[in-house]
Image (spheres, rainbow, N blue to C red):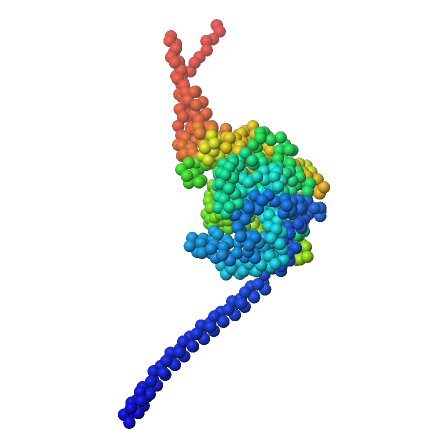
Amino acid sequence: MRNKLKKQQNGSGDAPAKKKKRQRLDIWNKLAIAVLTVVLVGCVSVFTLLVNVISEAPNFNPEQLVAGTSSRVYDKDGNIIAELGSEHRDNIKYEDIPQDLIDAFLAIEDSRFFQHNGFDLPRFLSSALNNLASGSLSQGGSTLTMQLVDNTWIANAKAQATQNGESLSAIDNIKYKIQEIYLSLLTEQSVGKKDILVNYLNMIWFGSDGGTRGVQNAALYYFGKDVNELNLSECAFLAGVINAPASYSPYYNYDLAMTRRNQTLQLMLQHGYISEEEYNLATSTNLAFQLEESESFTEDPYQSIVEMAVQETRELTGMDPYTTAMDIYTGIDSEAQQLAYDISNGEVYAFPDQYFNAGLTLINNSNGEIIAMGPGREYTGDSTSRNAATEPQQPGSAMKPILEYVNTFDILGWSTTHTVDDKADDYFHIGRDLQNSDGQYMGKMSLADAVSLSRNTTAAAALQDLIDSQGSSYFVQYLKDMGFNDDVAEAFDIQYSIGGGNMRCSTVQLANAYSALANGGVRVDAHVIRSVEVRGGDTYEYNADETQVVSEGAAYMMSSILYKTVNGGYPMYTSTLATNAYSVFGKTGTTDWGDSGAQYGIPKTAMKDEWTVGYTSDYTVAVWTGYTSTGIENGYYITLQVLYQNFASQAADAMLDLVSANSTPADLVQPSSVVSKASRDGGLILSQYYNTEESRSEGQEDDPNSKQRQERMELQKKCKDDPTIDEDCDGYEEAMEELQNRCSADPTIDERCDGYEEAMQQRQQQQACEASGGTWANGVCTPATTTVPDNPGSSQPDDDETTTAPSNG
């Protein structure tokens, strides 16, 4: 009985323990189910996300992987002027590739290329971990297949998104990477390894220029030989340079290029592609002895302007015309382009020496189309070479009309006959007076004289007045609206009045800014292309932005002055532009080296840049001349003898004559907002300022040859002795007041005294009176008294005595 009871007790004691065990089991089951659910949901979500990302990937077409189709560029008349891809890329076959070149690319870019399926997961994860550890994205982990896909599709998709105003986030970049991997896997399934490698080498950019792609042209450019003739050292360099073509160019960064080549050779040794002996021999080879920069791309007169069209096409379409076949239509004038190219290379006007250089841009005023560009002698078709047409330089006095003077009409109410004062002052607040180029100050002069004779002081004074009126921020925005770079605009200060300080611009920007003066004050963004047709795809129209930078009236008034600058008889280089065939307007500018030339042994006052801008109602041309970088390093600068040859103005004149030969430019039409001044002195003023003192006052007469100014200068010399001789003398009013005070005491001291004639007449009478012995007092002369002297021996009868005559007896 006790045993039974004990069993029952024991049995009843086991029940709670089993229950607890089941409860613990249920918790783990639920947790496992929850985890599996989360994993499943995560997998489904990831799968769904991947499906969505992949569905947005570019359409896979293996034919697009082949670098064979070419894009065409057309001039304004529909003529083909460039074929991108065929002319600038020569495709090779696998048999043409040296084994050293294959090994070099595999060593530095994708050592497991022939083993993976397009995506190398171990390498990708290794790169990701290294990037995470370093906090950078220096290692990409992309296979050669992925790089080919990126060049063919992904890079274009990113560019298109950016062009649409989208900012690429980290999530976006991950999305594009997933698409790249997906398309790479498809590529490996559709195309053989050898074809992938060949297509990759035919498509990538080696830095030889923006359009010359492919390893064959790279071999020609760097070494002057076909790809199958390359040696180990050369193959290692080409494999290394693609990572950063501009940085590793041996023509500009030789030491860096050598370091990169040796890194490639080290990896080839590490992966067993070359022996220690081959490595030592290759690294000891001086690459400079093998370099042979090809000139095959420098003879194309269209190269510089076509490259600008290509860049605009990329921005407009988000696609690369070197990898996507398209037709690009431009406003390029072939005849003008050939002349611009010839001028900038010294083939029209003989340059003074081998280092002299010139760059120019010709723009259509009404639509902003760049119709011609002269890149200069340093442009070789290489993206790292200097293009004198697009490289920023200090503009000097060429800035004066478009920065300060044109704005005085709108903001300050000036007329075209406004009188300015060329006088010494510390306008820049630097502790010394601002100098003019001739070291002289001419005093008061007309606005036309100040502009045409390029006086620095009047320009600085005008800009200071404008800053006082509007504030500096106004002109920061104005410079941006004029098309100058943001960083240049934001560094604005008073020195910009003479094109100094941090003011920099290219011939493209300066021509574009001046074009607004002939286009009613409207600047249309400078551009080359008109439209782009992607073959088998969309058509893109280029719609240039337009900005009203100054009023229509101010633009016309400024042009009327710049017409005088060219045609008014001023002894300046702009007179070269003068012609009877059509109306032309213009301005020149020069800058000096200052302290920056000391390292080259160049004097501070030596000229660095020379500019001429000329325009008609149809076109504007800006020309810069100066020296190449090599010339500067050798101490060359613009001497007076070089300046006297006037290359910039001659080039501008030739370009305008060419484009005006078949269609004479019309005269600019005076808008209704511009009226004659109330003073009728021949000046113009905006109608809103007609009832002002400026309108009623007579301005200084123009004096192109400074004849009147010379007379005034001689007068001022005399004024120093007697300020009262002329109203124009300094201190005239004070001196006249002092004179009148003296006149009050003695009106005869000066014929200008009040009552001078009466006083002089009285003085003459006084002198005559006193000369006759009279006495002069209070304006009356008293004659002297007459006395008859006594006669000895005779007597004078008294008045009352009678005198009797003797009789005759």
**Against 761, is 97 above or below?**
below
Q: Residue furthest top?
A: 809
Q: Residue at x 44, y 40 (%)?
A: 428
- Residue drawn 65% across the image and 33% down it: 348
Front one among 647 and 3: 3
Give above or below for 36 relative to 557: below
- Whether residue 120 is visible, yes or no, is yes
Which quadrant of the figure has residue 339? top right
Q: Residue 157 in the image: state x and y as whole percent.
A: 58, 57
Residue 11 or 107: which is nearer the viewer? 11
Residue 576 in picture, x, y percent from top left: 62, 34
Q: Quadrant of the N terminus?
A: bottom left
Q: In the picture provided, is 207 more to the left or to the right than 762?
A: right
Q: Which residue is painted at 53% across and 52% down in the image?
A: 112
How far across and how far down the image is residue 580, in percent? 68, 37
The residue closer to the viewer here, 685 or 131, is 131
- Identify whether 95 is placed above or below 793: below
| Pick the front one: 155 or 145 | 145
Q: Residue drawn at (43%, 31%), measured in percent from left and top? A: 747
In which quadrant of the rendered view does residue 188 lie?
bottom right
- Asked whether residue 321 appears in the rendered view, the answer is no
